[in-house]
Amino acid sequence: MALTALFESVLIANRGEIAVRVARTCRAMGIRTIAVYSDADARAPHVRACDQAVRIGPAPARESYLNVAAVIEAAKQTRAQAVHPGYGFLSENPAFAEACESAGVAFVGPPAAAMRAMGDKVAAKRTAEAVGVPIVPGYLGPDQSIGMLTEHAKRIGLPLLVKAAAGGGGKGMRLVTEGTEFAEAVAGAKREASAAFGHDAVFLEKYLARPRHIEIQVLADARGNAIHLGERECSIQRRHQKVLEETPSPAVSAALRAEMGAAAVRAALAVGYVNAGTVEFMLDVESNYYFLEMNTRLQVEHPVTELVLGIDLVCAQLLIAAGHALPLRQEDVAARGHAIEVRIYAEDAEHGFLPSVGRITHVELPEGPGVRNDAGIEPGSDVTVDYDPMLAKLIVQDGTRSAAIGRLRCALDEYVVGGVTTNLAFLRWLVRHEAFGRGDTTTAFIDEHFTPDALRDPQADQAARLAAAAAWIALAPTGAVADPWRRLGAWRHSARVHVVSFAGKAKAALSVSFALDRNAWQVSDGRRQALVEQKGAGAFTLQAGGATSRFVAWPRPGGVALSLAGRTYAFEVAAPPSVEASAHGTGLDRALTAGVVQAPMTGTVVKVDVRKGDRVRAHQLVAVLEAMKMEHAVVAPYDGSVSAVRVKAGATVIAGATLVEIEPA
């Protein structure tokens, strides 16, 4: 594909790894790039990846990356000839595409009319059905009253999905398995859809058990030509958002690929589609496929298609937007080998995939043949509640699926992120699971196979305690060692040996001493020993049990955290217990949390569902938090009565903040 275009400058209306990735292709094409950034991203990698950068507003996305007027003004100021929206934010906003056109700036994406036709999920399904593409049974009517929706829910039968008509990425989607859940599911889907898309209409769809999520990449030019670039399997998801994608799909034959590809092209041409887009299907156990939606933008998982086809999709987008004809014909499309992508998220898989916030302290990306990193983070990057928790993507390619899996396992073992909790340990578990190795991947994969216990390793936990003790001493701030009894809790100083005690389950004391002859810390808990060598500001190696492993550590309030084998550990240094606490056997962790319902993550309170004096049952909804564009339900831990409500809707709370106090029944 020729790396030439008619544009001299392109403004990239996005952030993170996709902005960096688009800038890379633009540079290869000789195009000047302009970044936009919020106050939270002033020092972000995507800002430095471009030739010029313009501030467009405060940290909240609605005041910056979703601010159409601010982005258009930035394009005018910098005389950008085109705007590439990336994915998310304004990428599927037809009003933004029209604003670009009105400003005389080319929009690198489909026409606004095509975007509207496919952006309304109900209209899109009707369009697909009209050109012979199967759709899932459901309710697509305009009547949004709860009575009408309930009537059709009974007709469709349970389980069913409530889905936002303008939705995407799992936002505004609820699974209903019990009739009593339906009204709240509708209310929650409408609320989330309104916040994310400015439109709260929903539709109902029969829930397919254990389907595969298959999508077809399409390219279309303004001259009526359209082709497909094969499929991507995107079945492994949590909260309806993808975690791993691969091509080709283990479940799609050459004949089925051709049939689904032709259906995708028909759907795209039916709305006058131009540029890159993706038609998504559900594939049932009998290989029947059903139109799901069309994403009118570049997909997060586009790199796997690029690697097996040798095509730069961003380059193709720019050429098409500049008026060029399609650079390929259908017969020119030939896939080679297998590619897999995993998404690196700032989230805690052991605790319901809750998002994590903080400052990145350390990043080590894997390298080697067949390994690609699309990343938008570096040491010092801040992960906030304002944006999606995805940090980066790791993509591998090899001749066969089994070889690609082996390459991915190796690359994940080399991947290190410090400062926030990530899903790296979960990904390592996933790519070693025998069902994944067989290609038995459905949208139910995580529900069927994953439990938090799958990531727990007692030996690794013990090694982490030893590592944390040495890291706590090594990272202690200047002056702390000189006056530990005032600043370091249970830390004790002597000429040779320090003693560290951790609160909670890890509260046994550990001895730490520095071995000058080894230039490393020696750690012991009385039964096990380890040697910890510091390799950098927060980088270490751990020798324990005959094995050597790398880890990174960073201070946290009252303790230390570390990332070891992809798993993040947080340790609180125990303060010496008071006489009263010792006499009564009161644990510090229990004293701090008895009767309290806490915020599981930093976020915004969407609603509080209880009042002081209310009686509640275990697992009853008490509040809803929003973080990183997703809603999270907070429930009562046991039966009881509400003794205090500490927050109001609209308040921003940090992880661990008290929301509600409940007296046990």
Image: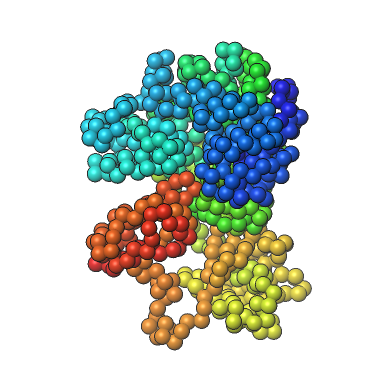
Residue 578 visible = yes
For the N terminus, the quadrant is: top right
Residue at 72% x, 61% y is 536
Q: Nearer the viewer, residue 309 or 109?
A: 109
Residue at 56% x, 68% y is 557
For the C terminus, the quadrant is: bottom left
Residue 661 appears left or right of 168: left
Residue 233, x across and y down, in percent: 51, 31
Residue 418 appears left or right of 278: right
495 is higher (above) or lower (below) than 644: below
329 is higher (above) or lower (below) than 178: above
Residue 428, x across and y down, in percent: 55, 48
Residue 450 appears left or right of 645: right
Residue at 47% x, 45% y is 629
The color scheme shown is rainbow
Residue 463 appears left or right of 168: right
Residue at 39% x, 15% y is 130
In the figure, residue 24 lies in which quadrant? top right
In the figure, residue 8 lies in which quadrant? top right
In the figure, residue 658 lies in which quadrant? bottom left
Q: Nearer the viewer, residue 9 or 286?
A: 9
Q: How many marks?
A: 0
Residue 86, x across and y down, in percent: 59, 34
Residue 240 visible = no
Q: Nearer the viewer, residue 54 or 225?
A: 54
336 is higher (above) or lower (below) than 420: above
Q: Nearer the viewer, residue 87 or 279?
A: 87
Residue 523, x across and y down, in percent: 63, 72
